[in-house]
Amino acid sequence: QVQLMESGGEMVEAGGSLRLSCAASGIIFSTYEMGWYRQAPGKQRELVARITSGGGTHYVDSVKGRFTISRDNAKNTVYLQMTSLKPEDTAVYYCNVVGVNVDNLRSRSWGQGTQVTVSS
């Protein structure tokens, strides 16, 4: 059974920083591309950052230069360092596997997420 446990979200002022963590179990973590998704109120969930099994990273334009995704395969953990936070970054943040070939795994692996609130 896959478990993904996100933590680190809180309320911060605009311009502040946060570091999110996601501990994974039930999968061979090192073999999966992992991503951070977010869902703002009234909006669809979007993938904002992803990291391949080899450590390559990709970001959506809205967070490029401000967010950094990393992973520690020894700890089965993926991180999201967020800086220069903006009110529009307010959302529930989730981690999960990435890729069209893991749709079934992803659909049954969503965790509770962690709330990030950025005040102006």
Image (cartoon, rainbow, N blue to C red):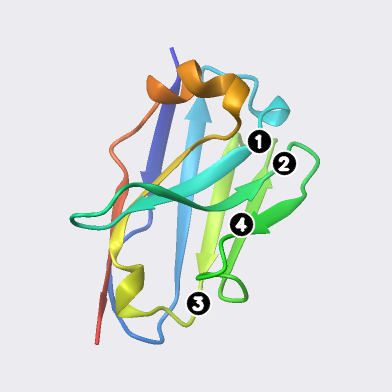
Q: Which mark is residue 42?
A: none
Q: Considering only vertical position in the picture, is 59 above or below 52? A: below
Nearer the N terminus, badge 2 or badge 1? 1
Would you name the residue on which mark 3 appears?
Answer: 83
The front one of 78 and 35 is 35
Q: Which amino acid type is shown beneath numbered disc 2?
A: Thr
Q: Secondary structure at mark 4?
A: strand
- Can you name the residue that lies furthest to the left here? 42
Q: Which residue is pictured at 35% across the width and 47% down the height?
A: 45
Find the distance from the CA under tag 2 to the CA under tag 4. Answer: 10 Å
Nearer the N terminus, badge 4 or badge 1? 1
Q: Quadrant of the N terminus?
A: top left
Q: Which amino acid type is shown beneath numbered disc 1?
A: Glu
Would you name the residue on which mark 2 appears?
Answer: 52
Q: Position of residue 63 (x, y in %)?
A: 52, 69
Asked if labels 4 and 2 touch by Cβ distance under 8 angstroms, the answer is no
Find the distance from the CA under tag 1 to the CA under tag 3. Answer: 23 Å
Would you name the residue on which mark 4 appears?
Answer: 69
Find the distance from the CA under tag 4 to the CA under tag 1. Answer: 12 Å
Would you name the residue on which mark 1 appears?
Answer: 33
Nearer the N terminus, badge 2 or badge 4? 2
Is residue 48 left or right of 117 when viewed as pictured?
A: right
Asked if labels 1 and 2 touch by Cβ distance under 8 angstroms, the answer is yes
Nearer the N terminus, badge 1 or badge 3? 1
- Can you name the residue that lies furthest to the right here? 54
Give the quarter of the image for residue 28.
top right
Q: Position of residue 12 (x, y in %)?
A: 29, 77
Find the distance from the CA under tag 3 to the CA under tag 4. Answer: 12 Å
Q: Secondary structure at mark 1?
A: loop
Nearer the N terminus, badge 3 or badge 4? 4
Nearer the N terminus, badge 3 or badge 2? 2
Neighbour tally class for label 2: few under 14, some 14-19, many 20 plus, Cα within 10 Å: some
